[in-house]
Image (cartoon, rainbow, N blue to C red):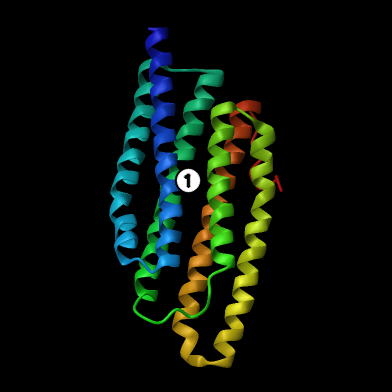
Amino acid sequence: MQRHFHEELEALKQTLLAMGGLVEDQIRRVMKALLERDDVMAQEVVERDRQVNTYDVEVDEQCVSLLALYQPAAGDLRFITTAMKIVTDLERIGDQAVNIAQRVLELNREPQLKPYIDLPRMAEQAQRMVKESLDAFVARDTALARQVCGEDSEVDLLKEQIFRELLTFMMEDPRTIPRAIRLILISRFMERVADHATNIAEMVVYLVEGKMVRHTLA
């Protein structure tokens, strides 16, 4: 019975990592759709969210089954409860990718407002944070998890920089306002991706050390 339990724990981890890989790819693809003004790719991101949601349900069901069948304790219990938290953040990252894709489809109906410089940097940083938080989860690496939490401030700074630049556009020419607002929204959605990656990293610290560090790491 113990062997089956650990096999199912491993299967849970692999499902979670498959979901993580998918949402990472969603962020990468939606930014490519923005840069290349690619409606087809943006629409694919929207449609692939169904797979993210399928993983969400699958992980939840696996967690509930493990809790009901094996009544785990200590580290195994923390692993399962951590997985249930992480899957929620991954699903929300997927939602942010969809939000961005919808703004991309709207932006593509009009001429591009400006060259995109900081948004791709922001996306790259946020995507890296998602990957690193999942790597920290797999390796139970609290040093990497804490590093991810520290990287969140860089994304915040980029968001503020983007806002200031776009505010200048809007003040100089009111006709740019609809496009500028959509780009500001994209930066906010990307900031939330980084926030969810930070949540995952904080749960890794809980998994390994057994203590909650939410709102305390920076």
Q: Is residue 92 left or right of residue 215?
A: left
Comparing 42 with 20, the one in front is 42
In the rendered view, tell whether residue 195 sits above or below residue 14.
Answer: below
The image quadrant of residue 209 is top right
As drawn, is 105 to the left or to the right of 168?
left
109 to 77, vertically: above or below: below
Q: Residue at 64% of width from left, 69% of height from top?
A: 160
- Which residue is rendered at x = 34% and y = 56% of the image? 45
Residue in view at x 37 percent, y 7 percent: 1
* Residue 70 spot, x, y in % from top left: 40, 15
Give the residue pinned by disc 1: 89
Q: Tell me if 42 is positioned left or right of 214 in this view.
A: left
Please name the residue shown 43% across and 57% down the image.
96
User: What is the x, y in percent for residue 68?
Assistant: 36, 21
- Residue 144 drawn above or below residue 113: above
**Mark 1: few/some/many CA within 10 Å (<14, 14-19, 20+):** many
* Along the viewing direction, whichever of 109 and 137 lies nearer the viewer: 109
Q: How many marks?
A: 1
Find residue 100 and report its image quarter. bottom left
Picture coordinates of residue 175 (x, y %)? Answer: 46, 91
Residue 167 in percent (x, y) is at 59, 82
Relative vertical location of residue 132 with respect to residue 174 in this rendering, above or below:
above
Residue type beneath disc 1: Asp
Could you tell me which secondary element the residue under label 1 belongs to?
A: helix
